[in-house]
Structure formats: structure tokens, C-alpha cells
Image (tube, coloured by chain):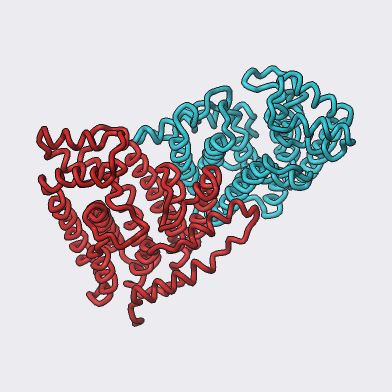
Chain colours: A red, B cyan
Amino acid sequence: MNKLKSTEELQDFINLAVNEIDLSFEPSELYDPIRYILSLGGKYLRPKLVLMAADMYHLDLTKVMPQALGVELFHNFTLMHDDIMDEAPIRRGKITVHEKWDINTAILSGDVLFVKAYQSIVQADCEMLPKIIELFNKTAEEVCKGQQLDMNFETQDQVSLPLYLKMIRFKTAVLLACSLKIGALVANASAEDQEKLYHFGIYIGIAFQLMDDVLDVYGEQKDFGKQIAGDILSNKKTCLYIIAYEKANKDQRKVLDHYFSHQHFEPKNKVLEVMKVYDAIGVKSLCLEMMAENHALAIRYLNAVSVSEERKSVLFKFIDLLMLREN
Amino acid sequence: MNKLKSTEELQDFINLAVNEIDLSFEPSELYDPIRYILSLGGKYLRPKLVLMAADMYHLDLTKVMPQALGVELFHNFTLMHDDIMDEAPIRRGKITVHEKWDINTAILSGDVLFVKAYQSIVQADCEMLPKIIELFNKTAEEVCKGQQLDMNFETQDQVSLPLYLKMIRFKTAVLLACSLKIGALVANASAEDQEKLYHFGIYIGIAFQLMDDVLDVYGEQKDFGKQIAGDILSNKKTCLYIIAYEKANKDQRKVLDHYFSHQHFEPKNKVLEVMKVYDAIGVKSLCLEMMAENHALAIRYLNAVSVSEERKSVLFKFIDLLMLREN
């Protein structure tokens, strides 16, 4: 029985593999942006989940590394295209691809990155290939749906909480769930375990995103790459806003309508006034409650996976760190 | 021995299959543009090639229809993204997706269309799946390279003929070649035949694109969806331009430089003056010669395919029609 790999060991393992991806192709206009976005690093959350799931079943992790890299490449493809659509200037503290080059470059390099993701994902044994591809395609389509719902929210006056939860499930949670399930699948886990890990991924993904919403406004601002309460400043309809708007009285709703209109406001003042409403309604605790419910559901699914506690320990520790982060 | 299907029968067969593609998903913002671009029809050149290649080997064509649809979906994905990059207002005589909706919609719907293409392509027996996917991924990457080279040409002062041929090979020919090879592959043709059909596709694709360049300027203008000499008006570096520029004397080069600068000219006059240079140099016949060379090479490869003349007859007739079109 091999020892379970620590998060740090997995990080090193992924770093090595990412550095080995061959992107020295022509024309350079197409591959430079891919090298650039990959060089920005990131937490490697998704490939870590692939490897952790596979490691639970004692798989030689080199066997699932192509899939781990594949989901990371896919994630970076979505970032490149989402950043165009969201007109985001900054990604991981650095200038975004469409700003550094231009929109056309970000579209086409993104497309190639998507192909590269597929090329990596399909490096698997023939008997499991159809299942991997089916899951990956379904996930890819859902991630696009999530981005579309998110964009729709910008022009919708009101967004219901169920629709918001659907959006974050598609935009964030399904790729985490897919990562875990692919890891388990390649490691020949039982169909039941694969499903349990998938559901674990869904609920931890939703909890993670709700936490993100809360931290954007209430987190400690250690990370200079991030704007303080950026979601409020950009009129984003987050879980905090949606709950606040649902529970607001007439006056509070007026304040929200006023500051979430597309007028220009002094940033600090806008954040202050909106937070006054949030605090009066108590949306922070309501969101954290919802976050905790999803977190608990996730844990229940992970507990039900039929491997020893010891084989789950790294995954447990990893998500604890994720959920307890302060910014 | 089943009778070979005529081009018309294949067209009907493809029409039926395209109409059966289920795209009734939510959010509609994502799927409406896909339904729209598919409703514009087109010649179904690529799926026809898939089916024709498979029909040469007596395959039950329902078995390869998913791949035929897959290459057509992929082709439409590239059109949707290319039209953004090229700022094209019109596609198949109708307004383009990014103009009818917006750029973000065309990016994200295009991404989903790419996923739909993959979902269709991979509906194949397990033993041939890795080969299909490898070929398709390689082709998809090359098509992106072709588009990038084409975009690079816009800002390059000079483009060499070999680089131009490389561009059209990637942008146009490889997908035709891939279509033929996938058809042969699914029909269990020999590896040699698959390669011959692939090369046939490459050379017919290059010939097809060279013909396109010539017809843009010298074709009969029956098709009101197309602009007369649109390539000259948009300063496109086509085979005609590249050969003209290489062979031009000092005065002729001055004329080309003048009219291919980004100043505004009276359209008719611009076309007339550029065509004077083209005609003095005789670029039309030089391009047609190159076209004929590639056409002949293609025929040589098709002749070498090891099935009876009769099984090749539809494909021969089809490409004759393609190469003899007048606009």
C-alpha cells in the first residue's frame, strides 16, 4: 500500500507536468498567450482534485496526470474566454490575455487551448475513454451554460436564489465534480464511489463559490491582486445581493436599486452604503449558513465513499483549508 | 453490393440528420445562435466527403453520420469565431451571429458548438475512437493555425507563396482531408487508402481555395450574397495578389502598394486599377495553372485508392462540379 500524497507533493508533481507541456509551436501568436496564462500559475485546484481522487484508490498517479492537466487546460481556456466577455483587466494579479494582446488573439488562442485540453484528456485506456469523454463534454457544455447565465444576470433586474445556485453549480461546481469523478474513474473506483465523489464536488463547489461571494465583501484584504468589494463596485448579483434584495424593505431596496444602477458613485461610499443594507439584513450570516449547509452535504458524500478514513485524509484537509481561507 | 449514393441522396440524408440535432436547451441565448447558423444551410461539403468516402467501402452510412455531422458542426464553430475576428457582416447571404447578437454571444455559442461537434464526433466504436479523436484534434489545431496565419497576413507587408499555401492548407484543406479520412476510417478502409484519401483531400482543398481566389475577382457575379472582387476591396492577400506582387515591376508594385494601403478609394476604380496590374502580369492564368497542378495531384491520389472506378464515380463527379463552378 503506497502512502497517500500530500497536497504539497501533488503541487510539485503538477508543477513538473505543467512545465513539460510542449507549446513550442508556430505561429507564436497562437501559443505565446497559452504559455503566458499557464505561467501565471494558480492554485491548481482542479488537477489536485483529479489526483487526490485517484490517490484514494492507490492509482499510480502518472496514469491520470493527462486528465489532471486536461481539466487545468480546460479551466484556463474558460478563463481566457470569460475574461473577454467580462472585460476583466486582471487575472491572477497580471494583465489578461485580451488586454495584453487583443480580443481576436484571446478568442483563437483560447480555441487552441480547448483543443489542447481535449488532447490531454483523451490520453486514457480505450475501455474508459468513452466515459471520460462523455463526462468531460457534458461538463464543458455546462460550464458554458453557467457563464451564459452569469452574463444574463447582468441585464436582469432580479435573479432568484435557485437560479443563482444553478449558475454557480454550472460555472464552478461541475468542473470540480468532474475532476474528482475522472480521478476515481481512471482509478477504477466503483460507479457508486464515482457518483459520491461527483456529488461531493458539486456541493463543495457551491460552498466554495458562496464563500467567495462573502469574502469579496467581508474578507481580509491581504491579496493586492483583488479589489475590495469588487462585486459591489461592478454591480455583480452575488448571493449577498440576491438575498439582500429578496429580504429588503422598501427603503433598503431603494438604496440597492440606487447603487446598483449604472451611475458613477464614489467607490468607498458605494461600498459603505450597500454594506449598511447588507448588515442591517444580516446577509453575511445567511450566506454563511447556506455555505455551511452545502459544506455539510459535501462532507456527508465524502464520508460515504467506501475507502478508509486514512485514504480520505488529504482531501479532507485540503477542503478544510479551502473553506477556512480568509480572503 | 449496395448502390453508391448520389450527391443529391447524400444531401437529403444530411438535411434530415441536421434537422434532428437536438438543440432545445436552456439558456436559449446560448443555443439560438447555433440553431441560427445551422439554419443558414450551406453546401455541406465536409459531411458529404465523410459519407462519400465511407460509401466507397459499402458502409451503412448511418454508422458514420455522427462524424459527418461532427465535422459540419466544427466547421460552423470556426465560421462563428472567424466571422468575429474578420469582422464579417454577412455569412451565407445572412447577417453573422456577432452582428445579429453580439461578440460575447458569438464567442460562447461558438464554444458550445465546438463541444457539440466533439459530442457528435466521438459517437464511434471503441476500437476506432482513439484514431478518430487524434485526427480530429490535430485537424482542429491546424485549422486554428490557418486562421492565425491568415490574420497575420493582414499586417505583414509581404507574404511568400509557400507561406500562403501553408495557410490555405491549414485553414481549408486539412478539414476536407480529415473528413475523407474519417469516412474511410469508420468504414474500415486500409491505412494506405485512408492516407491516399487524406492527401486527395489536401490537394483538392488547396485547388478549391485557389479557385475561390480567382473566382472572387474573375468569376461571374451571379451570387448576390457576394461582393464583387471583395478580396481586392478588403486588401486581402490572396494568391492573385501574392503572385502579382512577386512578379510586378517597379511601377506595378507602386500601384499595388497604393491601392492596398488603408486609404479610402472609390471601389469600382480600385478594382479596375488593381485588375489592370493583375492582367498585365497574367496572374489569373498563373493561379489557374497552380490550381490545375493541385487538382491533378488530387486526382492521382484518388486514382490510387484501391476500390473500383465505379465506387469512386460519385466523388469524381462531385469534385468536377466543385472545380468547374463559375462563382
For the N terminus of chain A, give its image quadrant.
Answer: bottom left
* Nearest to the observer: residue B88 or residue B45: B88
**Vertical side of B283 occupied by A231: above or below:** below
- For residue A58, what is the image quadrant? bottom left
Q: Quadrant of residue A220?
A: bottom left
Pick the residue in front: B43 or B1: B43
Location of the C terminus of chain A (image quadrant): bottom left
Q: Position of residue B28 (x, y in %)?
A: 36, 32
Does A178 sit left or right of B41 as displayed? left
Is residue B108 found left or right of B1 in the rendered image?
left
Q: Residue A18, percent across and down? A: 49, 66
Q: Position of residue B258 (x, y in %)?
A: 77, 31
Residue at left offset 54%, top offset 51%: A112
Q: Is residue A199 visible?
A: no
Image check: A87 left or right of B181? left
Q: Residue at x 78, y 24 (%)?
A: B218
Residue at image position (36%, 63%) is A45
Which of the pair B94/B19 is nearer the observer? B94
In the displayed structure image, the side of residue A319 where residue A89 appears, left or right: right
